[in-house]
């Protein structure tokens, strides 16, 4: 192998310097998009329309759980179904991670709640077993089709059975927002799907701390 000549070495050093510079520029751009002032960091929002209201569902003890049962504390609601192949497990893991990242005294003021939009397969017990697998304090709720449908409607949750399935083997389409309800039972804020757990934790801490 021939030794590189001086001009070749000079060109090589210049090229490496250019790569280093562009790496720095890319790093800066990434840092900017993840900073707290960047648009990409907006994980929560308030909808333009009224969201929430009275609902009546059933827990695994057969007890009725309503919006009034949850009021008094903060609650973090997520609508999904236990047969969901990927979105629901990811979202519920994010919620659990966010709660675990929070100061315990603040996290304890929030009740995480999983509400099924697939009552046909998800009985209250199935919903509770699923919820417990993500977080020890997470409540799983179900109900008859009418109660579940009315609850989803109050929260503007879209859900529909995907065509092509058969009997009890089917997928559900559904929206995936996370709702923080205040101790007064009204919506405090909503999180976009796939919110980063660390950002969700800091937003939740701000709301709970501010109120306390
Ligand atoms: Ni899902």
Image (tube, rainbow, N blue to C red):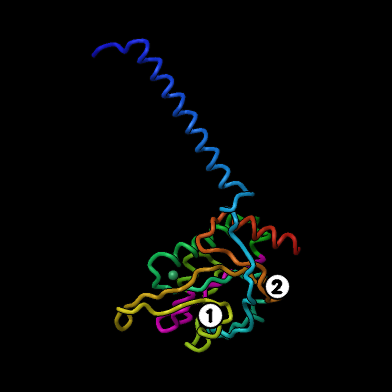
Seen in the picture, residue 204 relative to 79 is either above or below; the reply is above
Give the Cα distance between marks 2 and 1: 20 Å
Question: Which quadrant of the figure contains the N terminus?
Answer: top left
Q: Residues within 10 Å of mark 2 (few under 14, many from 20)?
A: some
What residue is disc 2 on?
183
Q: How many marks?
A: 2
Which residues fall within the magenta stretch? Answer: 109-128
Seen in the picture, residue 84 relative to 120 is either above or below; the reply is above
Classify mark 1: helix, strand or loop. Answer: helix
Q: Position of residue 119 (x, y in %)?
A: 45, 83
Q: Residues within 10 Å of mark 1 (few under 14, many from 20)?
A: many
Q: In this rendering, would 200 be left or right of 23? A: right
Q: Position of residue 76 (x, y in %)?
A: 60, 69
Q: Quadrant of residue 205?
A: bottom right
What residue is disc 1 on?
152
The verdict on residue 124 being magenta is: yes
Classify mark 2: helix, strand or loop. Answer: loop
Q: Position of residue 186 (x, y in %)?
A: 68, 75
Q: Position of residue 168 (x, y in %)?
A: 33, 81
Q: In this rendering, would 181 be left or right of 127? A: right
Question: Which quadrant of the figure contains the C terminus?
Answer: bottom right
Please tell me which residue is depicted at 44% across the width and 65% down the height of the picture. 89
Please tell me which residue is depicted at 42% across the width and 74% down the height of the picture. 173
The verdict on residue 119 being magenta is: yes
Q: Is residue 111 visible?
A: no
Q: In this rendering, would 39 be left or right of 127? A: right
In the depicted view, which residue is nearer to us: 173 or 12?
A: 12
Please tell me which residue is depicted at 50% across the width and 38% down the height of the picture. 26
């Amino acid at each position: 192998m021939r030794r590189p000549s001086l001009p070749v070495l000079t060109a090589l050093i210049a090229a490496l310097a250019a790569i280093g510079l562009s790496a720095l520029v890319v790093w800066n751009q990434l840092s900017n998009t993840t900073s707290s002032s960047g648009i990409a960091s907006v994980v929560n929002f308030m909808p333009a329309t009224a969201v929430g209201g009275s609902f009546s569902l059933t827990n695994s003890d057969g007890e009725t759980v309503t919006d009034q049962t949850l009021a008094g504390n903060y609650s973090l609601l997520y609508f999904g179904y236990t047969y969901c192949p990927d979105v629901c497990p990811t979202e519920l893991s994010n919620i659990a991670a966010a709660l675990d990242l929070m100061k315990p005294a603040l996290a304890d003021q929030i009740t995480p709640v999983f509400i099924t939009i697939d009552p046909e397969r998800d009985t209250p017990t199935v919903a509770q077993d699923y919820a417990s697998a993500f977080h020890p304090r997470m409540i799983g709720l179900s109900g008859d089709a009418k109660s579940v449908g009315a609850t989803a409607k109050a929260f503007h949750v879209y859900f529909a059975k995907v065509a092509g399935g058969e009997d009890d083997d089917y997928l559900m389409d559904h929206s995936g927002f996370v709702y923080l309800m205040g101790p007064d039972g009204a919506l405090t804020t909503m999180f976009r799907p796939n919110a980063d757990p660390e950002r969700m934790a800091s937003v939740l801490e701000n709301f709970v701390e501010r109120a306390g």
